[in-house]
Image (tube, rainbow, N blue to C red):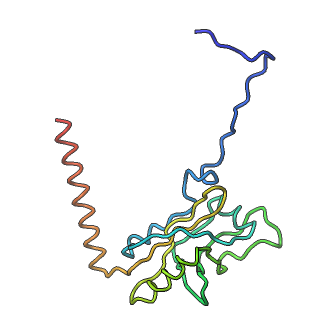
Amino acid sequence: MVRHSSPTGRPEKEKQPRRDPTASGERDASVNRAASHNYFLLEKFEAGIALRGTEVKSVRAGRANLKDAYGLVKDGELWLINAHIGPYEHGNIFNHEPLRTRKLLVHKNELHKLIGKTQQKGLTLIPTKLYFRNGRVKVELALAKGKQHWDKRETERRKTADKEAREAIARSRKS
């Protein structure tokens, strides 16, 4: 097998240099794993988020945490509260506050739908993911209903039973 070299004798450059998987949208910037444990996630929505420059850089660096965050509809606008985006390490005096309230951007008809559903008893908005799409930071919000302690145990039992069933099927296929 003959290798063809470039006519100039220099090695060929890679056409597209490898981008950061978080920035290119291949991997989520932050995932709220506690959300599915503490809540029944009923319906999911995608929203844009209004961020400052250093916040985008911090999200890209993986310094975002959605664990205690929630969404709130106030005065006809959607807000993300308690989402922690750590300060940018190469920032200056204009760095952002880590726990500031951030505005979420959704279409008006989605906002009206969310207003109607969050006013129902026991439903809240919980952010489940923070990710990049086409260079913009997006948040996946879930309409959620809180789980009781016994609900969590039941979910754990069901998960364990499903896992054991899958393992049994895999063992039977091997033999």
Residue 78: give x, y in percent of width and height: 59, 81
Residue 110: give x, y in percent of width and height: 52, 76
Residue farthest right in this picture: 93
Residue farthest top in this picture: 1
Quadrant of residue 2 within the rendered picture: top right
Residue farthest front in this picture: 109
Residue 104: give x, y in percent of width and height: 61, 75
Q: Is residue 73 above or below residue 141?
A: below
Q: Tell me what residue is drawn at x 45 percent, y 66 percent.
A: 33
Quadrant for the N terminus, please.
Answer: top right
Q: Tell me what residue is drawn at x 59 percent, y 65 percent.
A: 138
Q: Does residue 109 appear left or right of residue 93 in this picture?
A: left
Quadrant of residue 149 within the rendered picture: bottom left
Q: Tell me what residue is drawn at x 16 percent, y 41 percent.
A: 172
Residue 88: give x, y in percent of width and height: 73, 65
Q: Does residue 83 appear left or right of residue 116 in this picture?
A: right
Q: Which of 98 and 123 is in front in this view?
A: 123
Q: Nearer the viewer, residue 103 or 112?
A: 112
- Total label count? 0
Q: Does residue 122 appear left or right of residue 46 in this picture?
A: left
Quadrant for the C terminus, please.
Answer: top left
